[in-house]
């Protein structure tokens, strides 16, 4: 309530002031918003997976069809009675070659075969030095500036992130012909989505994706600058090193590597490294050869862990007891039973959090009948709905003042969620959108000496306008898709067809959520 009162006070001041401000309705999404902030990743029964929407090739060139897995991977998976298989619904995934019971070990990856920030620091001292320099720069900036929370947060962002280092490390490994890195397919993600596809999405989603693209390009520029700085400090007169880094670290290559890290990493318990930024405390991102071929299915139960040989009592209730490696290894244990030739799944995360927009942003696919059936809207959507619900009050001048207010409160990048399952607004929409705008309306009506403010009816009208506007926008997007299919059927590269199908499904699913609304 305190926040709401302060908002009303500020709005009252703005409305009563004589200051005239330009109309600002080109709302942008935050480049600091992380649309995919979870490391537990993969795909679904009727989904595409990160290997399905991609082909192969070290240089990220387009290919006509997914290639067969490399022999080393086939032999490795065979140790665990797994094989790569192209399923009709999910594309490439892993199937079991024997029956499996609950508690079976699906796969074990030796720790020295996993790709982590620590392993990359050991393989490429250049990356470790880059992290040191970035951390030192951030620390120095923090000590010389006012130590407010916002300043400290800004200075922490000067540090390199684990994802930047992993993405750069993948490119260096690929350049050195590392078998695992060389086998990774191109990643046809939203980071490199053609405009003709992007424009088939609702405007709020377009802005979110463009902000994500801008954010990743900024990460690339920062990473490249630090790497070149390290090389300049260790100048040995060899210009070829700089040229190699600039070639390996092209923008397109980095976007491929970054999306690969986002879609393939799994979160594991691990020590913090204060030199870098991570997604959480006491957790590290790990790339595990073989494991990253497992597709996603909501409800699939697995337990990832880092274990040591001396902790293994050979009581795993599975047939893999002869496969224990010396030393440490990452183990993925299934809590589901499978029949021979079943596809083996993992879950990418909490059902309530993995809505189709997040799935599209992170993995490049969406899920039919996703239990997280939500529709996401932004400030622009909210303001347009206000003009529909109360056009005489929410004039262009009023919206201008509101936009200034939202900027002052740091709310210009807020997102609002409608729950298609409950057919109700979630907290973000109810409190941060409907109730807040109703309070502002009532405040102004009272100042204008209106006897009966219409807060309750306005919230209903505003919600109806929001949902109606989105229905209409979805219909227009679906019409664009139909035109796109006819106009560019031959021109659109085959590798982008899964993304096109994902967008079509997202629009269809959201339309169905809104179709239930009375």
Image: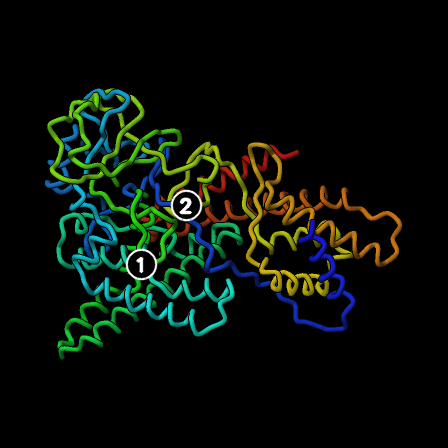
Kindly report which numbered mark, 1 or 2, lies closer to the viewer in this rendering: 1
- The quadrant of the picture occupied by the C terminus is top right
Query: Dividing the picture into quarters, in which one does residue 84 lie?
Result: top left
Q: Position of residue 354 (x, y in %)?
A: 44, 40
- Mark 2 burial class by Cα count in 10 Å: few <14, some 14-19, many 20+: many
The picture quadrant where one finds residue 223 is bottom left
> Residue 22, percent across and down?
66, 71
The local secondary structure at tag 2 comes to helix
- Please tell me which residue is depicted at 35% across the width and 51% down the height of the picture: 189
| Most foreground residue, 407 or 514 | 407
Between discs 1 and 2, the one toward the N terminus: 1
The residue located at (80%, 46%) in the rendering is 454
| CA separation in Å, label 1 and label 2 | 21 Å
Looking at the image, which residue is at 27% across and 36% down? 305
Residue 360 numbered tag: 2
Label 1: how many Cα within 10 Å (few below 14, some 14–19, many 20+): many
Looking at the image, is 443 positioned above or below residue 270? below
Tag 1's secondary structure? Answer: helix
Q: How is the image coloured?
A: rainbow
Q: Position of residue 372 (x, y in %)?
A: 49, 36
Which of the pair 516/410 is nearer the observer? 410
The residue shown at (32%, 32%) is 89
Q: Residue 93, relative to residue 7: is it above or below?
A: above
**Side of 23 relative to 81 (left or right):** right
- The answer to whether residue 350 is left or right of residue 338 is right
Are the residues tagged 1 and 2 within 8 Å (C-beta)?
no
Q: Which mark is residue 164?
A: 1
Q: Residue 31 in the image: x percent, y percent? A: 46, 60
């Amino acid at each position: 309530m305190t926040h709401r009162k302060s908002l009303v006070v500020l709005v009252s001041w703005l409305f009563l002031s004589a200051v005239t401000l330009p109309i600002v309705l080109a709302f942008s999404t935050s480049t600091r918003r992380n649309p995919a902030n979870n490391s537990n990743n993969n795909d679904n029964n009727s989904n595409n997976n990160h290997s399905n929407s991609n082909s192969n090739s070290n240089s990220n060139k387009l290919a006509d069809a997914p290639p067969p897995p490399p022999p080393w991977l086939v032999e490795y998976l065979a140790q665990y009675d797994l094989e790569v298989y192209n399923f009709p619904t999910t594309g490439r995934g892993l199937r079991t070659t024997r029956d499996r019971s609950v508690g079976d070990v699906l796969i074990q990856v030796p720790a020295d075969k996993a790709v982590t920030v620590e392993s990359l620091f050991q393989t490429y001292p250049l990356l470790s030095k880059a992290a040191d320099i970035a951390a030192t720069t951030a620390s120095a900036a923090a000590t010389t500036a006012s130590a407010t929370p916002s300043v400290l947060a800004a200075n922490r962002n000067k540090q390199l992130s684990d994802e930047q280092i992993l993405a750069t490390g993948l490119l260096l490994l690929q350049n050195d012909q590392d078998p695992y890195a060389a086998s990774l397919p191109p990643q046809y993600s939203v980071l490199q989505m053609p405009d003709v596809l992007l424009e088939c999405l609702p405007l709020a989603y377009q802005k979110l994706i463009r902000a994500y693209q801008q954010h990743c390009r900024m990460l690339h520029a920062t990473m490249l600058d630090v790497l070149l700085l390290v090389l300049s400090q260790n100048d040995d007169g060899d210009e070829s090193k700089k040229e190699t880094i600039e070639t390996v670290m092209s923008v397109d290559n980095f976007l491929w590597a970054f999306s690969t890290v986002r879609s393939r990493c799994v979160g594991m318990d691990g020590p913090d490294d204060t030199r870098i930024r991570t997604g959480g405390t006491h957790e590290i991102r790990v790339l595990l050869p073989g494991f990253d071929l497992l597709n996603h299915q909501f409800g699939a139960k697995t337990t990832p862990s880092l274990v040591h040989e001396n902790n293994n009592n050979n009581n795993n209730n599975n047939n893999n007891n002869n496969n224990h490696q010396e030393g440490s290894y990452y183990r993925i244990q299934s809590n589901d039973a499978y029949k021979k030739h079943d596809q083996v799944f993992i879950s990418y995360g909490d059902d309530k959090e993995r809505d189709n927009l997040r799935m599209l942003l992170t993995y490049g696919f969406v899920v039919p009948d996703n239990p997280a059936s939500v529709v996401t809207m932004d400030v622009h959507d909210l303001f347009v709905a206000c003009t529909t619900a109360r056009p005489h009050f929410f004039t262009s001048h009023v919206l201008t003042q509101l936009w200034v207010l939202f900027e002052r409160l740091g709310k210009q990048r807020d997102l609002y969620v409608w729950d298609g399952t409950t057919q109700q607004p979630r907290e973000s929409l109810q409190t941060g959108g409907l109730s807040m705008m109703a309070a502002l309306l009532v405040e102004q009506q009272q100042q204008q000496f209106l006897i009966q403010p219409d807060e309750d009816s306005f919230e209903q009208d505003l919600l109806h306008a929001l949902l109606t506007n989105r229905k209409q926008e979805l219909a227009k997007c679906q019409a664009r898709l139909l035109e796109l299919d006819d106009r560019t059927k031959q021109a659109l590269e085959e590798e982008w067809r899964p993304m096109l199908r994902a967008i079509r499904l997202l629009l269809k699913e959201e339309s169905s959520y809104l179709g239930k609304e009375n």
